[in-house]
Image (spheres, rainbow, N blue to C red):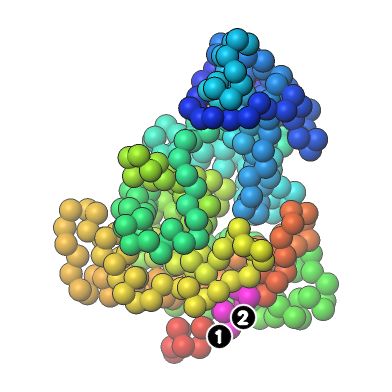
Amino acid sequence: MVAIENQGQVARAVEVAPAPTPAPRIPKEARRLLHELASAWADVADCRALEVVPLKGAMTNEVYQVRWLTGLGEVEPKEREVRKALMRIYGDGVDLFFDREDEVRTFECMSRHGQGPRLLGRFPNGRVEEFIHARTLSAADLRDPEISALLASKLREFHNLDMPGPKSILIWDRLRNWLQAAKNLCSSEEAKEFRLDSLENEITALENEFSVDYHWVGFCHNDLQYGNIMIDEETNMLTIIDYEYASFNPVAYDIANHFCEMAADYHSAKPHILDYSKYPDIDEQKRFVKTYLSTSGEEPDAEEVENLLQNIEKYTLASHLVWGLWGIISDHVNDIDFDYKEYARQRFEQYWQKQPVTITS
């Protein structure tokens, strides 16, 4: 059964006439949902004359922009407005990473909080979302001081969301679950190459290290790469999207993960290659943290800033383990064109390089 909300967005743009048929990989259930959605919109000229455009940069799902011409036949196609939606086809094997029903509930709750797009409909292996008329950030945008400040404030707002469900930290259970999944999928040679047998002790050591002090827990995105952040350039409003991995965690982990993502450019010729020379320097880190903490209305003191910076540095280790394991698992279950294994190798290399100097006994 397909659930539909009779709402959507119209983009004012000059567009070429769309092709009459969708991309061949679109499941028939998705086609039916798209036709039903468009037929409920009175301004769509032909609900079956849709264009489906793949969006690059997604590594968990396949993501498409879907668009229909609006208006009547006497208007030239290039002068018509275009109605758009976003279609997400779930990647293979994602049930190893998160519970899809939990993710959809989070998506719907975020929509009610005004934090993201609305759900327009679901089909068995995907969904259709409201299309947000904003620009997805680029890798370079993360280094822009103005955009970085906007994001720091937005992330503080995100962390303070009162989301339903238990408020317990997820990261350690996630690491152990993903480690077991990786062991189940890997050959003995791969397990040896990635030192999987030693990772249980590493996870326990990290958990013990972080249990000594209080860590501020909030609702974290856990995947704050540039492709999951959109900006409306007319209002300078940011929207954080894609909540597959969202959960309650220490906020320092979420910021650490964001800093690690500055090494990535998923739209380059080699999207799996990471450049850690782009990791933010201490001045960039301080600016971000000061803006993040001052969003509450009070100027943070130097000790508060330094404590959060130290915790962020430690939590980069957890980020490397999380996404290293993700890369190993994805290499076995996902056929998206991305070198997951090499990506995993780089994350583990960073872990073993940074661990001795970050965690001192």
Q: Is residue 16 left or right of residue 118?
A: right
Asked if disc 1 and disc 2 are in contact, CB closer than 8 Å, the reply is: yes
Near-viewer residue (100 or 177): 100
Instruction: Find residue 288 and report its horizontal and vertical position in percent.
Output: 32, 64
Near-viewer residue (103 or 59): 59
Q: Which residue is mark 2?
A: 349
Residue at 55% from the left image edge and 74% from the top image edge: 275
Look at the image and give the residue range highlighted in magenta. 346-352
Residue at 68% from the left image edge and 34% from the top image edge: 52
Secondary structure beneath dot 1 equals helix
Near-viewer residue (192 or 208): 192
- Residue 85 seen in render: yes
Quadrant holding the C terminus: bottom left
For the residues labelled 1 and 2, the Cα–Cα distance comes to 6 Å
Residue at 60% from the left image edge and 10% from the top image edge: 74
Instruction: Find residue 268 and report its horizontal and vertical position in percent.
Output: 62, 62
Instruction: Find residue 316 and report its horizontal and vertical position in percent.
Output: 48, 72
Q: Is residue 129 left or right of residue 252?
A: right
Residue at 44% from the left image edge and 76% from the top image edge: 314
For label 2, the crowd category at 10 Å Cα-Cα, with few meaning under 14, some 14 to 19 and many 20 or more, is some
Q: Which residue is mark 1?
A: 353
The amino acid on which the numbered mark 2 sits, given as a three-letter code, is Glu
For label 1, the crowd category at 10 Å Cα-Cα, with few meaning under 14, some 14 to 19 and many 20 or more, is few
